[in-house]
Amino acid sequence: MTLPNSRLIIGLTGGIGSGKSTVADRFAALGATLVDTDLIAHALTGPGGAAMPAIREAFGTAVIADDGRLDRAAMRALAFSDPAARKRLEAILHPMIREQSQREIEASTGCYVMLVVPLLVESGAWRERAHRLLVVDCPVEVQIERVMRRSQLAREQVLAILAAQATREARLAVADDRIDNSGEPAAIGPQVDALHSIYLALAAQAPAARVTS
């Protein structure tokens, strides 16, 4: 696969609670440009966000918070109880996220781009935009415990979120690179440092030579 963009793009993904943000921040500290689709989505659905008029029209005020932002808890409950609602939301947000992420990639000045996409494996369109796929991995039970502790969600709610994501096995099957985040946070650093060295070397090559798998 050869991508038209001259920048090296690493697609970073992992299941909920896997530690994607922690890993992404470490790469950013080393000089990579982060393009985080979650952050883009939050901006689009914040007060005055570009997606809010269409969301209000599609779903009414029941999913709008008092300050005008998307009520994520209400939207999450609706989306998981009604697959059609989730598809309507995705039809609004995904094109906007893709456009903004492309603008950020084109404006990037880092040594390479770390494109953070929670559902990268589930979406062929996102996978096609990355030269390599990096999966942040940990056991499912660790994911569940982290999300319950962090977000104060019931176990059943976390299981519902996991059911809408690719399995751990599916992510690992397509990964070019993997970071094991099943243990102590200190174990992340050496793994990131090693991959950073590889990515720097790849970024120095011609685009067509970057993808080896």
Image (cartoon, grey):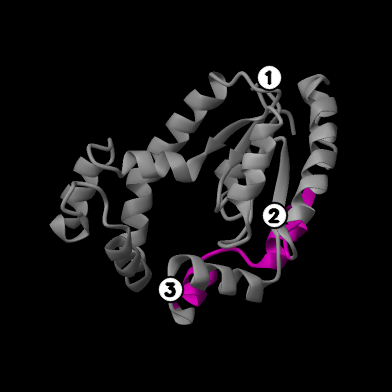
State the quadrant of the C terminus. top right
Residue depicted at x 19% and y 46%: 68
Amino acid tagged 1? Ser
Q: Position of residue 121 (x, y in %)?
A: 62, 53
Disc 2 element:
strand
**Mark 3, secondary structure of its residue:** loop
Mark 3 is surrounded, within 10 Å at the Cα level, by few (under 14), some (14 to 19) or many (20 or more) other residues, namely some
Q: Which residue is mark 2?
A: 136
Q: In front here: 179 or 97?
A: 179
Residue 20 versus residue 110 in the image, above or below: below
The mark that comes first in sequence, 1 or 2, is: 1
Residue positioned 54% across, 70% down in the render: 162
Residue 176 in view = no
Residue wearing tag 3: 153
Distance between the alpha carbons at the discs numbered 1 and 2: 25 Å
The image quadrant that residue 105 belongs to is top right
Question: Is residue 3 rendered to the left or right of residue 90?
Answer: right
Q: Residue at image x 40%, y 43%?
A: 41
Quarter of the image where the N terminus is located: top right
Q: Which mark is residue 208?
A: none
**Which percent across, then down, holds residue 176?**
79, 47
Which numbered mark, 1 or 2, is in the foreground of this view? Answer: 2
Name the side, left or right, on which 56 lies relative to 24.
left
What residue does disc 1 label?
6
Which amino acid type is shown beneath numbered disc 2?
Val
Magenta range is: 157-182
Q: CA distance from mark 1 to mark 3?
A: 42 Å
Q: Which of disc 2 and disc 3 is earlier in sequence? A: 2
